[in-house]
Image (spheres, grey):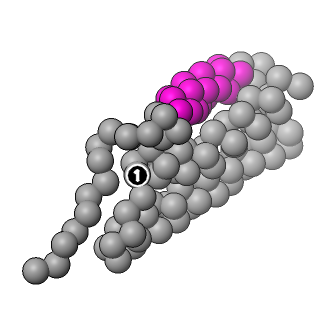
């Protein structure tokens, strides 16, 4: 009979607990920068004509960045699934941090860019 090892639901080391804390901070930052980006983008849409070249370029960039981030996050999830199917499980706190990273980076970049 084959022995399988399961990852604990909660971390057992202080370093892993710190990783969970970092996931929480990253999720909060993602949430807050997303809200500020949505607010600033709505302000742009209300103050500038939607057919101006600047707005069309910004809207296209927004959509492109969202697609790129979702493809990167999907790749991370696919790798995690394939690894778990082959017996190499990665803790949920590591996978969630890797999955949020593309969205977090782009959301922070959008927020900084729209402030200018």
Q: Residue furthest bottom?
A: 1
- Main secondary structure type of the part rendered in magenta: helix
Percent across and percent down for residue 80 are: 43, 64
- Rate crowding at label 1 as few (under 14), some (14 to 19) or many (20 or more) other CA atoms within 10 Å: some
Q: Where is 2 relative to 69, above or below?
A: below
Q: Is residue 66 something that shows in the picture?
A: no
Q: Residue furthest right?
A: 116
- Which residue is label 1 attached to? 91
Q: Is residue 106 something that shows in the picture?
A: yes
Q: Where is 54 relative to 32, above or below?
A: below
Q: Residue furthest front?
A: 13
> The residue tagged with tag 1: helix, strand or loop?
loop
- Seen from the viewer's position, the closer of residues 63 and 99 is 99
Left or right: 69 as drawn, with respect to 4: right
**Residue 23 colored in magenta in the image:** yes
**Residue 110 colored in magenta in the image:** no
- Seen from the viewer's position, the closer of residues 101 and 115 is 101
Percent across and percent down for residue 116 are: 89, 25
Residue visible at 81% across and 46% down in the picture: 57
Q: Write down the quadrant of residue 62 in the picture.
A: top right
Percent across and percent down for residue 44 are: 75, 24
Residue visible at 47% across and 52% down in the picture: 95
The magenta stretch spans which residues? Answer: 18-40
Left or right: 50 as drawn, with respect to 12: right
Left or right: 75 as drawn, with respect to 7: right
Left or right: 71 as drawn, with respect to 62: left
Percent across and percent down for residue 1 are: 10, 80
């Amino acid at each position: 009979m084959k022995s399988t090892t399961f990852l604990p639901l909660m971390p057992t080391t202080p370093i892993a607990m710190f990783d969970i804390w970092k996931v929480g901070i990253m999720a909060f930052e993602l949430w807050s920068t997303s809200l500020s980006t949505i607010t600033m983008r709505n302000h742009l849409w209300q103050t500038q004509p939607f057919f101006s070249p600047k707005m069309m370029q910004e809207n296209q960039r927004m959509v492109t960045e969202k697609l790129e981030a979702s493809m990167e996050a999907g790749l991370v999830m696919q790798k995690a699934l394939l690894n778990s199917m082959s017996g190499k499980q990665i803790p949920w706190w590591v996978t969630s941090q890797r999955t949020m990273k593309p969205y977090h980076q782009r959301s922070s970049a959008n927020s900084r860019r729209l402030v200018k």
